[in-house]
Image (tube, helix red, strand yellow):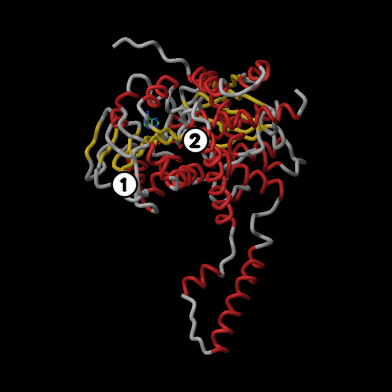
Amino acid sequence: MHMTPEPSFRASVDLMFKRATQFMNLSPGLEEKIRVCNSTYTVRFGVRLRGKIETFTGYRSVHSEHMEPVKGGIRFATNVNQDEVEALAALMTYKCALVGTPFGGSKGGLSIDPRAWEEHELEQITRRFAYELIKRDLIHPAQNVPAPDMGTGEREMAWIADQYQRMNTTDINHRACVTGKPLNSGGIRGRVEATGRGVQYALHEFFRHPADLARAGLQGGLEGKRVIVQGLGNVGYHAAKFLSEEDGAKVIAVIERDGAVIDERGLDIQALKEWVTQNGGVKGYPGTSYVEAGAEVLEHACDILIPAALEGVIHKGNAARIRAPLIIEAANGPVTYGADEILRAKGTIVIPDLYANAGGVTVSYFEWVKNLSHMRFGRMQRRAEEAHSRMLVEELERLSADRGLGWELRPDFKERFLTGSDELALVRSGLDDTMRTTYQAMRAIWHGRPEVGDLRTAAYVFAIDRVARTYRSKGL
Ligand code: NAD
């Protein structure tokens, strides 16, 4: 079959943007202003490694500064390029607007295979890249705040934070220059799991609306639902773990770089993750069938498909064969524009990336606020909250004793009720609230304006409207 080539990732995001703006009343000038990427900085730098100078290419793209700081992860991968970084930066603008985090959109990338270098070498490379960005205020607590993305995690963020501090020794807010840091460098509890946790909360909210479930031809709860996950990295691992261990969903297949493993009875995600860490891939994991052409498993029958690795994996070439009635985009841009049209026509429900993976930036926002406030969440309130609860419990027990009622509170209730909220509980509460209210805002447009047609377009309409309002209130 001959097919027209697909647009690039960035063009794909622009087409999704345009599909939304046709339902909006923006002046053409404002529409253009919101759509375009403000700037992309490209840097090539050398690092002396293994006796010779290696040159690396990195990017930091700022899509929209309607709010500052701008925010967005830094990706380490060999195929990082300007088009991809700009697409991801645009998605960040819409994502932040959608979930109500007060940031503009940005993204960074370094073209590198992180697995090809030793830890101390990676540290040198990361610090040098960070130096180039810090020098130009492209890492800065008030202007541009990176976070982890593919190929980076807490370790890299700690190096970046330290590099910033070395170069800005008197900046009292230095810790707020980057998020996704380890706890001992000013991180926040619950950030590592946040994106996967957000995917879980998004599904919880979707499943609270039987009418929405029905559109996907599904019913009931998450218990027993068959799930396929692509990518067992930070996002995919946590999503798969929480859905299987806490919600009783069955993860029947995991697709990784080296292929896919399938077990219709449901995989033990923790054990599989340990296998991947030890063996470098899923191949050979006991008790499963292995498929070398992993991407084909995206087409297997399941209830929920979770692409959590990279962009463009569901494209015009395979979209028609995708059998999952519900796709939740844990990765950024896993469904191309062309594939999105095909899926929409056949009634597949897609919970879009700018919503589905917004848990990361939401908790990054909490971390940034924590850094600026210089205090852990819950530090002031927790014991006061516990004292209040204790008063109530003691009063109930006194009443029961005085009146001879013989009431007894269950010990586990008492324990839970008497425990004040610590930082992790507060972070999860804030994340859950964000995922719930945002879904409700999207669905109000999805159901209320039939011409909009799908959740992705609804998300864009909501997000673009917010950005437009910010611009208008600035007098642009
Ligand atoms: P990660 O590097 O931790 O994990 C990516 C995983 O995908 C790895 O296990 C890798 O082996 C696997 N993978 C790579 N190529 C693959 C292929 N061709 N087929 C199958 N698996 C493959 O990255 P991550 O942070 O989990 O990010 C994954 C996606 O989620 C990206 O699109 C990223 O932009 C998005 N995202 C991440 C965050 C975050 O907080 N980390 C937040 C929002 C969105």
Q: Earlier in the sequence, mark 2 or mark 1?
A: 1
Q: Position of residue 397 (x, y in %)?
A: 56, 82
Q: Position of residue 337 (x, y in %)?
A: 45, 21
In the image, the residue with mark 2 has its CB under 8 Å from the nearest atom of ligand 1: no
Q: Residue at x 38, y 44 (%)?
A: 240
Give above or below for 70 relative to 408.
Answer: above
Amino acid on which disc 1 is placed: Lys
Q: Which residue is mark 2?
A: 447
Q: Total of numbered circles in the picture? A: 2
Amino acid on which disc 2 is placed: His
Q: Residue at x 62, y 24 (%)?
A: 63
Q: Position of residue 116 (x, y in %)?
A: 43, 29
Task: Using residue 204 as the reference point, say whether residue 434 is left or right of it.
Answer: right
Q: Using the image as rendered, state which of residue 458 and residue 133 is in the foreground.
A: 458
Residue 144 in which image quadrant = top right
Task: Using residue 28 as the reference point, say whether residue 344 is left or right of it.
Answer: left
Residue 231 in which image quadrant = top left
Give above or below for 339 relative to 297.
Answer: above
Q: Secondary structure at mark 1?
A: strand
Q: Nearer the viewer, mark 2 or mark 1?
A: 2
Q: Which residue is mark 1?
A: 250
Give above or below for 182 relative to 416.
Answer: above
Q: Is residue 41 visible?
A: no
Q: Using the image as rendered, state which of residue 5 and residue 77 is in the foreground.
A: 5
Q: Is residue 223 visible?
A: yes
Instruction: Bin the neighbour count of mark 1 within 10 Å (Cα to Cα): few under 14, some 14-19, many 20 and up.
Output: many
For ligand 1, the image quadrant comes to top left
Q: Position of residue 228 (x, y in %)?
A: 33, 38
Instruction: Bin the neighbour count of mark 2 within 10 Å (Cα to Cα): few under 14, some 14-19, many 20 and up.
Output: some
